[in-house]
Image (cartoon, helix red, strand yellow):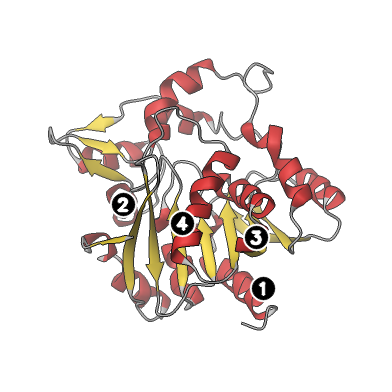
Amino acid sequence: MDVAIDKSEFSYLPAQAEAMGAPVPSAERMLLTLPDGRQVSGLRFGDGAPRITLLHGAGLNAHTWDTTVLALRQPVLSIDLAGHGDSSWRSDAEYSPRTLAADVAAALDAWTTEPQLVVGQSLGGLTGAALAAARPDLVAELVVVDITPGIDTSAGPAALREFYAGPTDFATRDELVDRAIAFGFGGARADTERGVFLNTRRREDGRIEWKHHFAHLAAQTLAAHHPGDDAAPSALHTTGWDDLAQVAVPVTLVRATAGFVTAADAEEFARRLPEARVVAMQATHNVQETAPAELAALIGSRLASHGL
């Protein structure tokens, strides 16, 4: 296990913490080399062994949880899923939840000492379900944020489709920030600059590119995908309910009122998992960014239910 020494990615934390009235936790980037040579990367926040593991959604990275981490004030592990952040891309472009869960399990084996309260948003939520089904020894409880099996998020809003169908590399980060703002993404420019910085990298030729593999696959994927077409099934749809049915630990679904999970989707979730909790939050799909305090309060309450 190696720890990277580049701390520039954490330079945004003090201002975020000040805005939230929260202390700045210790933070470090973790790297684990897998048997096939790929690397899994993650962020460890706070002192002591983590009891909470956070899994992001498609196209995001471990830093999407930063404000939620600040609100939690707990030791936390936030993992970059394969093909995202500083984790390696897969040459086979296989990013189904069960495949992603295998890498997460390896990271938890290396970086944690006790079963985790696993919180996964969107793709991370179904990855968490696959993890809990395959490795119940690693998961004490599962919180699924704004996703249920069968929801096809691959098409996405029209503006998002057009955004990712465009260029995948840029001369400067400012160029990418301008493009994101032009499409109505990111909010204030300072917030957009932070998001772009944390989700891009500079290539050897000096060009800026997205860190996540999905952006580079998007043009061909979006062009070929037709929502509802059986030839392009959602990976979440084919395995998600089976995985959730095998989860033996407590499960909570967080439904964002302005997100992807509809009231009908939440009802179906409750029907299939009658013992699960369903909680609605006033937030968009990326609940960890738009309602971090509320989400942190929920996570904290679930941690407290375990006497921690």
Q: Does label 3 or label 4 sit earlier along the sequence? A: 4
Q: Residue at x 40, y 76 (%)?
A: 46
Q: Secondary structure at mark 3?
A: strand
Disc 4 residue crowd, few under 14, some 14–19, many 20+, Cα 10 Å: many
> Circle 1 is placed at which residue position?
302
Q: Does label 4 or label 2 sit earlier along the sequence? A: 4
Q: Does label 2 or label 3 sit earlier along the sequence? A: 3
Q: Residue at x 61, y 70 (%)?
A: 299
Question: Which numbered tag is attached to residue 80?
Answer: none
Q: Residue at x 49, y 42 (%)?
A: 58
Disc 3 residue crowd, few under 14, some 14–19, many 20+, Cα 10 Å: many
Question: Which numbered tag is attached to residue 143?
Answer: 3
> Circle 2 is placed at which residue position?
198
Residue 279 appears in view: no
Relative placement, left or right, of 95 versus 302 is left
- Quadrant in which the C terminus is drawn: bottom right
Distance from disc 1 to disc 3, alpha carbons, whole Å, reads 9 Å
Question: Which numbered tag is attached to residue 107?
Answer: 4
Q: Does label 1 or label 4 sit earlier along the sequence? A: 4
Q: Does label 1 or label 3 sit earlier along the sequence? A: 3
Relative placement, left or right, of 213 versus 283 is left
| Amino acid marked by disc 1 | Arg
Are circles 1 and 4 on residues that touch, CB within 8 Å?
Answer: no
Q: Nearer the viewer, residue 160 or 80?
A: 80
Q: Secondary structure at mark 4?
A: helix
| Amino acid marked by disc 3 | Val
